[in-house]
Image (spheres, rainbow, N blue to C red):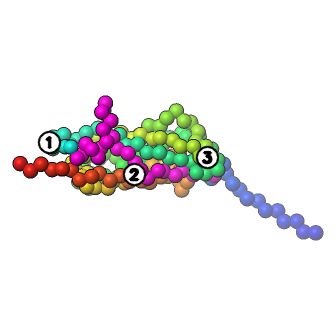
Amino acid sequence: MRVFLLFVQITHSDLFKISMNPNIQCILDDETNQSCDSYIRSIMDPRNCNVPVKFQYTVQNIGTACEEIDRISGIIGVPSSQEGQNPAVSNIEFSDVDELCPGEEMVLFQRTTLNLCDLSDTTVGFELEMNGGGDNREGRGSIYFPKRNEVVM
């Protein structure tokens, strides 16, 4: 009789996998909580273009295991017209969730100041990583900023 032993190494963290909802929201980071879309369309004075904004996105664990969430970092990919402003932000706020289990979602916020006039009619990409990244711990998405109604004087 022959006996074959098969060893398969599966680590707990290999069973964790995030999925990022591609529908990223942008709202003004003030008491109005106005959407960036409606604000861009309403800007009449170019001096009102530079505003604090808050991006909100949702990630879900689509894996089969829970994982403790130690850190989350993200990058906002901004068009070349704003490269000098370096609006990429690494700190992402997340709720008091310290563990994300299968099927659970987590809402993330990322704050920065952007010139929304420069982003008119532009798509901006986002990348985030949880616990240092890796194939199962990264998410990508994008947001489209509508065309600004420019006033000709």
The numbered mark, 2 or 3, whose residue comes first in the sequence reads 3
Closer mark to the observer between disc 2 and disc 1:
1
Disc 3 packing (10 Å; few <14; some 14–19; many ≥20): some
Residue at the disc numbered 3:
102
Instruction: Give amino acid for label 1.
Output: Asp
Q: Residue drawn 23% across and 53% down?
A: 147
Residue at the extreme right of the image, as rendered: 1
Q: Residue drawn 53% across and 43% down?
A: 105
- Cα separation, mark 2 vs mark 1, equals 28 Å
Instruction: Specify the quadrant of the image occupied by residue 67.
Output: top right
Instruction: Specify the quadrant of the image occupied by residue 26.
Output: top left
Per the rendering, the mark at residue 126 is 2
Q: Can residue 104 be seen here?
A: yes
Residue 33's place in the image compared with 4, above or below, is: above
Disc 2 packing (10 Å; few <14; some 14–19; many ≥20): some
- Cα separation, mark 3 vs mark 1, equals 47 Å
Residue at the extreme left of the image, as rendered: 153
Question: Would residue 87 appear left or right of 20 to someone viewing this image?
Answer: left
Q: Which range is magenta?
A: 15-41
Residue at the disc numbered 1:
45
In reply to whether residue 121 is colored magenta, the answer given is no
Instruction: Give amino acid for label 2.
Output: Phe
Per the rendering, the mark at residue 37 is none
